[in-house]
Amino acid sequence: MLGAAACGKAPEEGGGTSPAAKKFTGCMVTDVGGIDDKSFNTSAWKGMEAAKAANSNIEIRNVSSKAEADYTPNLTQFVNQKCDFILAVGGLMEDATSKIAQANPDQQFALVDGKVAESNVFPMQFDTAQAAFLAGYVAAGMTKSGKVATYGGMKIAPVTIFMDGFADGVAYYNQQKSKNVQVLGWNKATQNGSFTNDFVKQDEGKKVSDTLVAQGADIIMPVAGGAGQGTTAAAQNSGGKYSAIWVDVDGCESTPNCPALITTVVKNIPDAVKDALLKAAGGSKLTADQGTIGTLENNGVSIAPYHDFDSKVPAELKAEVDKLKQDIIAGTVKVTSAAQPQ
């Protein structure tokens, strides 16, 4: 309903006798999963709404992609509607965005979680490995079984960057504490692991996490969009057998499974999108070389509060995570991933 309402055009003002002030139109194409995926699509739309709230001359619309085949027609639809700013959400949309941007060099595009060669596409990328490193350290400090896990929706850079950071955070904990916490579901060295091959189907997420729990994992971080809710719901219903770490947007604000969530690896998409849309509406031409990269230092990525787990996370572990964050910002602890944005 939200998508349908957002796609409606604003009525003409002025009773036909005088032209209304021209609205600046910001139009967003979601990745599969739709506007209510409780993840990156939801976050991007929140940023669009925030920009509209800050500037009443902005009109926003969205259309949801049901499959990858929808990307090109959805982007083309907004070009034909003469949208002033067209936002593509998700790294899977790189090829379609590149193609349409090349064919429409005067059109302003922006892309979340990707970067293409065309100068008229403004990229918003996030070094989520940094925040996932902190989450991996927390998981290693909280596990009782000595096994934690992560899995992805698809084997693409915006997903595996989380998994790399998580695995390295666990490894750093082991190094500091002389422990041997194992990571299931992902091998950073070989870049192989567990995937649902889907960002929507919750039953697929549950299947993967059921397997990981059967192997001994008691904390799982799904990086699979809406499919990950299959894990968080099952964790909440597990009677405390295992818990989860959410990604993208604070799971205690976006999912009904807060009691099962230790924390969230947050990607600050809303602020990045809001700032880009406001700048474009203010007359700035946003180009590929002006793109942003969210880090711990600029608050583009972070870990969310511990919420229901706040009393369960030891004060010492919290202090270590706070210090680790500052060490990563200072560069004394290096976080690396082949998927880090450039």
Image (cartoon, helix red, strand yellow):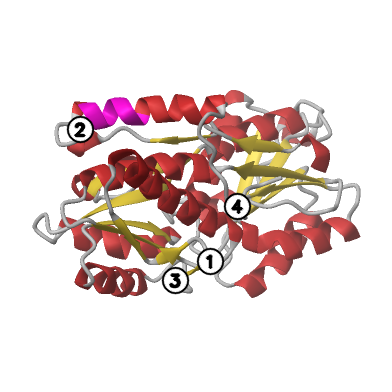
**What residue is at 57 percent from the left and 46 percent from the top?**
336
Instruction: Give the residue at mark 1.
Output: 191
In the image, taking residue 89 as reference, residue 202 lies left or right, namely left
Crowd rating for badge 4 (residues with CA inside 10 Å; few <14, some 14–19, many 20+):
many
Which residue position holds label 3? 195
Which x, y percent locates residue 112?
63, 48
Residue 310 numbered tag: 2
Q: Looking at the image, which is closer to me, 121 or 151?
A: 151
- Could you classify mark 2 by the number of other residues whose Cα lies within 10 Å: few (under 14), some (14-19), or many (20 or more)? few
Residues at marks 4 and 3 touching, judged by CB atoms closer than 8 Å: no
* Residue 2 drawn at (x, y percent): 48, 52
| Residue 62, numbered circle | 4
Residue 274 seen anywhere in this rendered image of the structure = yes
Residue 102 lies in what quarter of the image?
bottom right
Give the alpha-carbon distance from disc 3 to disc 2, as whole Å. 30 Å
Magenta residues, start to end: 316-321
Q: Is residue 31 above or below residue 279?
A: below
Of the two numbered discs 1 and 2 on the same chain, state the one appearing first in sequence.
1
Quarter location, residue 227: bottom left
The quadrant the C terminus occupies is top right
| Labels 1 & 3 near each other (Cβ < 8 A) | no
